[in-house]
Image (tube, rainbow, N blue to C red):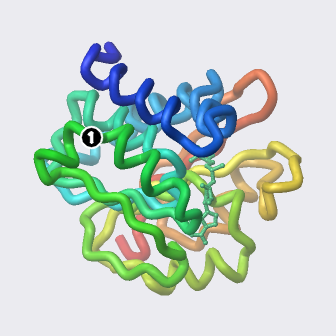
């Protein structure tokens, strides 16, 4: 996938203007980018028309920006994060689409967030406890396609890792339409595409 110069410009502005540029740059580690490109490639077969997409735990908005730059059809992306500092950074990261009314950044707890989006992506499953995840799932619509990612990387901010893809499937309580794992240099990323009911 090609990163275009206009988006690169907004990425640089977002990093430069963020309260903690080093932390923002963490979103650009090879493992983070590879995991998001892998997600985009694997959800494409499930997306055949422009959809509303909610990204929960959307951090500084890099996944939204990569989706906008991919060939995936998109109506609008909403990036939701509990950390209010993410809102300004992800708005700048996706400034072009925000101006066009196709991007919105929201500060909220994803576990309480209701959503009518056709696609709900949660790549921060390792950042919420099982209890929080169960609440998150309870608030999802049966109509939404759910895209979940977690990993086996043991660091303090990861409160619920999975030691295998099968363990992640057990934690997730969804009907699995697709699952896979991506071996990265420091950890393995797991992904499930599913629905509450199929
Ligand atoms: C380090 S980042 C993202 C890691 C993930 N692997 C990725 O690239 O998508 C985790 C994000 O989840 C957010 N987060 C944690 N708990 C949350 C919650 N309950 N609701 C919304 N966002 C949450 C954090 O604020 C943080 O921005």
Residue 160 versus residue 44 in the image, above or below: below
Ligand 1 quadrant in view: bottom right
Q: How far from the left and from the top, in percent, is residue 114? A: 37, 81
Give the residue pinned by disc 1: 95
- Where residue 162 sits, quadrant-wise, is bottom right
Q: How far from the left and from the top, in percent, is residue 90? A: 42, 47
Residue 112 versus residue 171 in the image, above or below: below
Which residue is at the front of the view, 156 or 72?
A: 156
Residue 168 versus residue 197 in the image, above or below: above
Which residue is at the front of the view, 64 or 11?
A: 11
Which residue is at the front of the view, 176 or 1?
A: 1
Q: Secondary structure at mark 1?
A: helix
Which residue is at the front of the view, 83 or 162?
A: 83
Which residue appears at 72% of the width and 46% of the height? 151
Taking the image as shown, residue 105 lies to the left or right of residue 87, namely: left
Quadrant where the C terminus sits is: bottom left
| Label 1 CB sits under 8 Å from any ligand 1 atom | no
Number of marks in the image? 1
Which residue appears at 44% of the width and 57% of the height? 87
């Amino acid at each position: 996938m090609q990163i275009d110069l206009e988006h690169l410009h907004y990425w640089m502005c977002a990093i430069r203007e963020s309260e903690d540029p080093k932390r923002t740059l963490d979103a650009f580690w090879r493992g983070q980018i590879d995991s998001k490109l892998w997600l985009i490639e694997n959800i494409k077969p499930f997306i055949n028309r422009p959809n509303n997409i909610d990204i929960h735990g959307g951090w500084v908005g890099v996944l939204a920006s990569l989706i906008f730059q991919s060939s995936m059809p998109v109506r609008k992306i909403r990036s939701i994060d509990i950390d209010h500092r993410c809102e300004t950074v992800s708005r700048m990261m996706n400034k072009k689409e925000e101006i066009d009314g196709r991007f919105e950044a929201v500060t909220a707890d994803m576990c309480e967030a209701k959503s009518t989006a056709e696609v709900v992506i949660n790549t921060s499953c390792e950042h919420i406890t099982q209890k929080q995840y169960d609440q998150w799932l309870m608030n999802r619509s049966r109509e939404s396609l759910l895209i979940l990612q977690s990993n086996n990387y043991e660091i303090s901010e990861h409160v619920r890792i999975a030691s295998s893809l099968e363990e992640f499937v057990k934690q997730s309580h969804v009907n699995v339409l697709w699952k896979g794992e991506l071996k990265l240099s420091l950890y393995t990323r797991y992904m499930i595409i599913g629905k509450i009911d199929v």
